[in-house]
Image: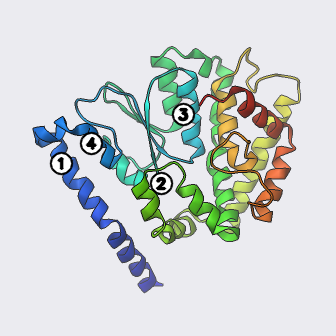
């Protein structure tokens, strides 16, 4: 066990070492060598960070298929906030975040025109609401509390999906990792898939029965709560007059369990999904919450 851990670390280092060195060299030159700043668009394109001291754009850095990232993407688009999104594959997004303004390890993350670096979807939604006068995101105290509650669905939903997909259809995960990311990341991801799988199995614990059962129960509890709310006749989750960030949060975080037709990452197709995932998605699509999520994606999605 000890040797296998060391073997894993050695393989991980040598798989990513060239990329890390490249990022480190360019990252340090970025601020010290004037010519690097002058060609910053090219450097940003290579690193896919889109961040430099002279850049006044609003950037969103994402793990391409992440439901949390889709939540923020949807909110920014609906708020008509002009931004540039940098999508990444697993592993690469962690390195990119480090060279995008801070020692951060999770997406989504935004870099504002004033060089503020903000991470966590709830923090980003709060920032957008307060700084861009988008009160519709959290218009009431009830909506704030509901948004916090529904946000807890995010990790359990995808971890339970990972548990089924990694065990029943590894090819589905590889395809997901490579969707809408830079070409070089798609290429390298083919060869470091084992690393992503190892991280999922060891660090995230997608094979630990008690942990998986806990995540599944969280998903069930959230669906029961939202089913109950929607069954009282309200049009929107927080009983608002119009769509709010709560509805978009629920619709986004549910997508791996509902697979709306409009999502670009996972297709609800019996011929393309393992039986375990197809049955799970079919079950949730039939719920009140599932039907609501499908409707939101169909009628409200902002591309």
Q: In which quadrant is the C terminus drawn? A: top right
Q: Position of residue 221 (x, y in %)?
A: 78, 45
Kindly report which numbered mark, 2 or 1, lies closer to the viewer in this rendering: 2
Q: Pointers 1 and 3 in contact (CB under 8 A)?
A: no
Q: Position of residue 280 (x, y in %)?
A: 80, 56
Decide which of 286, 273 is in the foreground and name it: 273
C-alpha distance separating marks 1 and 3: 30 Å
Q: Is residue 212 left or right of residue 11?
A: right
Residue sitting at x 45%, y 83%: 4
C-alpha distance separating marks 2 and 1: 23 Å
For label 4, the SS is: helix
For label 2, the SS is: loop
The residue to which callout 2 is attached is 89
The residue to which callout 3 is attached is 73
Residue sitting at x 55%, y 26%: 77
C-alpha distance separating marks 4 and 1: 16 Å
The residue to which callout 4 is attached is 42
Q: Is residue 66 left or right of residue 301?
A: left
Q: Earlier in the sequence, mark 4 or mark 1?
A: 1
Q: Earlier in the sequence, mark 2 or mark 1?
A: 1
Q: Is residue 165 left or right of residue 85?
A: right
Q: Is residue 91 visible?
A: no
C-alpha distance separating marks 4 and 2: 20 Å
Scheme by which the image is coloured: rainbow
For label 3, the SS is: helix
Q: Is residue 87 above or below residue 250?
A: below
Decide which of 155, 164 is in the foreground and name it: 164
Q: Position of residue 85 (x, y in %)?
A: 45, 37
Residue 287, quarter of picture: top right
For label 1, the SS is: helix
Dot label at residue 236: none
């Amino acid at each position: 066990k000890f040797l296998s851990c060391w073997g894993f670390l050695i393989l991980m280092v040598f798989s990513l070492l060239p990329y890390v060195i490249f990022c480190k060299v360019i990252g340090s030159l970025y601020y010290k060598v004037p010519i690097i700043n002058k060609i910053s668009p090219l450097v940003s394109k290579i690193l896919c960070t889109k961040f430099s001291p002279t850049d006044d754009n609003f950037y969103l850095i994402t793990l391409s298929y992440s439901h949390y990232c889709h939540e923020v993407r949807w909110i920014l688009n609906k708020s008509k906030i002009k931004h540039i999104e940098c999508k990444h594959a697993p592993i690469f997004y962690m390195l990119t975040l480090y060279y995008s303004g801070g020692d951060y390890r999770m997406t989504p993350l935004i870099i504002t025109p004033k060089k503020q670096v903000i991470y966590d979807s709830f923090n980003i939604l709060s920032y957008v609401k307060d700084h861009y006068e988008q009160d519709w995101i959290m218009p009431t105290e009830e909506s704030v509390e509901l948004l916090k509650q529904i946000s807890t669905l995010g990790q359990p939903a995808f971890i339970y999906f990972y548990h089924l997909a990694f065990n029943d259809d590894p090819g589905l995960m590889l395809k997901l990792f490579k969707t809408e990311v830079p070409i070089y990341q798609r290429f390298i991801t083919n060869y470091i898939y084992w690393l992503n799988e190892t991280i999922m199995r060891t660090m995230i614990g997608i094979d630990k029965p008690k942990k998986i059962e806990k995540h599944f129960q969280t998903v069930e509890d959230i669906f029961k709560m939202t089913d109950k709310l929607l069954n009282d006749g309200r049009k929107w989750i927080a009983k608002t007059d119009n769509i709010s960030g709560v509805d978009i949060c629920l619709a986004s975080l549910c997508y791996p369990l509902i697979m709306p037709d409009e999502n670009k990452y996972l297709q609800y197709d019996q011929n393309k999904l393992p039986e375990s995932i197809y049955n799970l998605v079919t079950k949730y699509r039939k719920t009140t919450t599932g039907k609501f999520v499908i409707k939101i994606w169909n009628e409200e999605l902002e591309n």
